């Protein structure tokens, strides 16, 4: 840490504070936001060069407030984004970084840059993944919804995929299925048949990883009539996997997963697929055992007496 650069930064901060708190001769507040923001940005640069990262975050945050007062929302967002990046990379403060990225997103959204707003929320999600997976997934959800609501699905595809990967790493397969279903819908709207087929196979794999054969079968039945999935290689693999699970045939599962299309799935999906294990206790070629019918309930004494009376009357 350079003491000289820190000193320069503190001088910039002092000048910025004076400009922000400037008053008229009569004591009325009259901030000089332009001069204040110049000094806060100068302080941020000085602190960053001095590796005084906590002070740099403070300076960038104050610069963002000045830009907001000047109605420069894009520049306010950029200043907060710089603060968030420092908090994440140098201070190793993921929660602080995530909050700053969330504020960045709000400014970008207010300014009209929906794609940049979504990117900021995704950065917040990445910052939280290692410390709070649930919060990470919630932030990914916010980012994805932003792309959905703003009709910018084409730009949000990779965000959805990374959200699915984060869910699978956190063993939140239920949320992975939710994101996968929304991405499948997006591919249908975008008329991207090959990607739709990949995503439908992804959902089948996640269902099977959860042990939900019925869910996988229902999805296959629905997807079969859409976007040529039934005729695709992905559709054939999905069918083979479900049949292998029904039969408890691990060799058939392994063979299905060696098909080329599986290798083109996203990394976390491929890893999940390789961990699939067919249910044990089923002979290959068999179907799951059906439950035996319940034995008849013994008749009560009153019912037996009534039956005897009916027989005596000759009705039975």
Image (tube, rainbow, N blue to C red):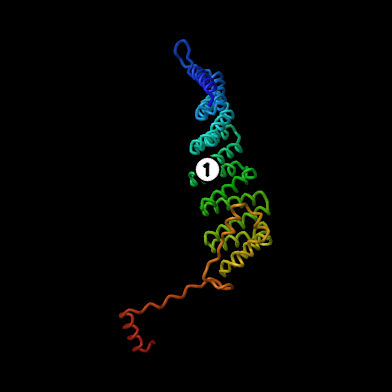
| Picture mark count | 1
Q: Nearer the viewer, residue 29 or 289?
A: 289
Residue at image coords 33%, 86%: 308
Picture coordinates of residue 11, whole percent (x, y):
51, 18
State the residue lying farthest toward the top. Answer: 25
Q: Nearer the viewer, residue 197 or 36?
A: 36
Q: Secondary structure at mark 1?
A: helix
Residue 106 in the image: state x and y as whole percent.
54, 35
Which residue appears at 56% of the width and 31% of the height? 82
Q: Quadrant of the C terminus?
A: bottom left
Establish if 99 lies above or below 214.
above
* Residue that carries the numbered disc 1 in the rendered image: 139
Is 43 situated above or below 234? above
Q: Residue 4 appears at what percent x and percent y?
A: 54, 21
Q: Is 224 above or below relative to 165?
A: below
Corner quadrant of residue 252: bottom right
Write down the quadrant of residue 278 in the picture: bottom right
Image spot of residue 246 (x, y percent)? 56, 68
Mark 1 neighbour density, 10 Å: few (under 14) some (14–19) many (20 or more): many
Question: Image point 53% across, 17% down: which residue?
Answer: 32
157 vs 114, nearest the viewer = 157
């Amino acid at each position: 840490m350079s003491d000289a650069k820190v000193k320069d930064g503190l001088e910039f901060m002092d000048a910025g504070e004076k400009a922000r708190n400037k008053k008229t001769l009569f004591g009325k507040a009259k901030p000089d936001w332009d001069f204040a923001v110049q000094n806060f940005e100068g302080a941020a640069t000085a602190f960053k060069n001095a590796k005084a990262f906590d002070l740099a975050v403070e300076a960038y945050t104050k610069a963002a407030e000045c830009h907001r007062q000047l109605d420069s929302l894009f520049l306010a967002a950029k200043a907060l984004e710089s603060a968030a990046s420092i908090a994440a990379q140098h201070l190793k403060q993921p929660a602080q970084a995530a909050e700053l990225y969330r504020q960045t997103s709000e400014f970008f959204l207010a300014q009209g840059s929906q794609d940049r707003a979504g990117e900021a929320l995704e950065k917040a999600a990445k910052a939280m993944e290692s410390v709070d997976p649930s919060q990470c997934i919630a932030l990914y959800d916010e980012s994805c919804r932003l792309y959905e609501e703003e009709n910018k699905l084409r730009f949000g595809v990779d965000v959805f995929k990374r959200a699915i990967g984060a869910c699978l790493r956190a063993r939140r397969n239920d949320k992975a299925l939710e994101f996968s279903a929304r991405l499948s819908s997006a591919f249908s709207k975008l008329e991207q048949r090959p990607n739709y087929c990949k995503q439908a196979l992804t959902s089948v794999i996640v269902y099977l990883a959860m042990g939900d054969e019925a869910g996988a079968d229902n999805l296959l039945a629905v997807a079969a009539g859409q976007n040529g999935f039934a005729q695709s290689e992905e559709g054939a693999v999905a069918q083979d996997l479900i049949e292998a699970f029904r039969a408890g045939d691990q060799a058939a599962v392994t063979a299905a997963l060696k098909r080329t299309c599986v290798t083109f799935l996203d990394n976390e999906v491929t890893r999940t697929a390789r961990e699939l294990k067919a249910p044990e206790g089923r002979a290959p070629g068999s179907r799951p055992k059906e439950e035996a019918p319940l034995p008849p309930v013994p008749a009560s004494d009153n019912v037996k007496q009534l039956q005897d009376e009916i027989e005596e009357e000759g009705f039975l």
